[in-house]
Amino acid sequence: MAGRHIVLTAVPGIPLIEPGDDIGAIVLESLKRASIVPRDSDVLVIAQKIMSKAEGRYINLRDVVASVAPLPLAAIHSTNDEFVPVSQARELLARAGRPSTLWVVPARDHRFSDNRPEFERRLTEAFTWIEQNQPR
């Protein structure tokens, strides 16, 4: 794997998504405002969550989180998330059973805007942890 690497860039300025929103137009406008010009080899990843929200498809995580076992469930959470309290993240992980883990990153908001380096370190750890905890 020598020489292989991945660079993750969060596109800034994407608002909270509501039912009926045009995800493509929102992403393109956010890329333009941030002066980010995708190259031919770039991969754009859009979270299923925002797609579901745009389509008006919502589920209660409490109803499904336990069903992921024995698949590993990792969560990275901000200490001051304005949308989901840390206590709720802990509750969901407790319902998930094992294997599950939670990293709580000191940050002022849901986007980890004042502590991106720590979030990115934890994200790398989470990928490794998930790989190590796959069912055999």
Image (spheres, grey):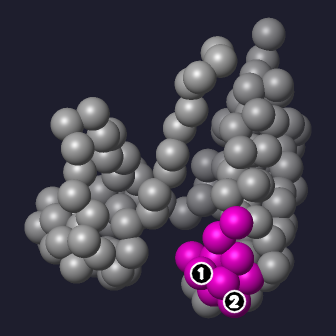
Residue 105 left/right relative to 49: right
Provide residue 125's location: percent of width, then percent of height.
Answer: 78, 44
Instruction: Identify whether 98 is placed above or below 75.
Output: above
Span colored in magenta: 107-117
**Among the 4 quarters of the image, the one containing residue 63:** bottom right
Residue 6 left/right relative to 135: left
In depth, the one of 51 and 76 nearer the eye is 76
Which residue is pictured at 76% across the width and 55% down the height?
122
**Visible in this render: residue 19?**
no
Which three-letter amino acid code belongs to the residue tagged 2? Arg
Which quadrant is home to the C terminus? Answer: top right
Residue 33 lies in the magenta-colored region: no
Which residue is pictured at 85% across the width and 49% down the height?
101
In depth, the one of 44 and 131 nearer the eye is 44
State yes or no: discs 1 and 2 in contact (Cβ < 8 Å).
Answer: yes
Q: How many marks?
A: 2
Provide residue 75's location: percent of width, then percent of height.
Answer: 72, 56
| Element marked by disc 2 | loop
Q: Which mark is residue 113?
A: 1
Provide residue 56's location: percent of width, then percent of height.
Answer: 27, 66
**Among the 4 quarters of the image, the one containing residue 71:** top right
| Element marked by disc 1 | loop
Furthest residue to the top? 136
User: Pointer 2: what residue?
Assistant: 108
- Mark 2 burial class by Cα count in 10 Å: few <14, some 14-19, many 20+: some
Instruction: Identify whether 62 is placed above or below 135.
Output: below
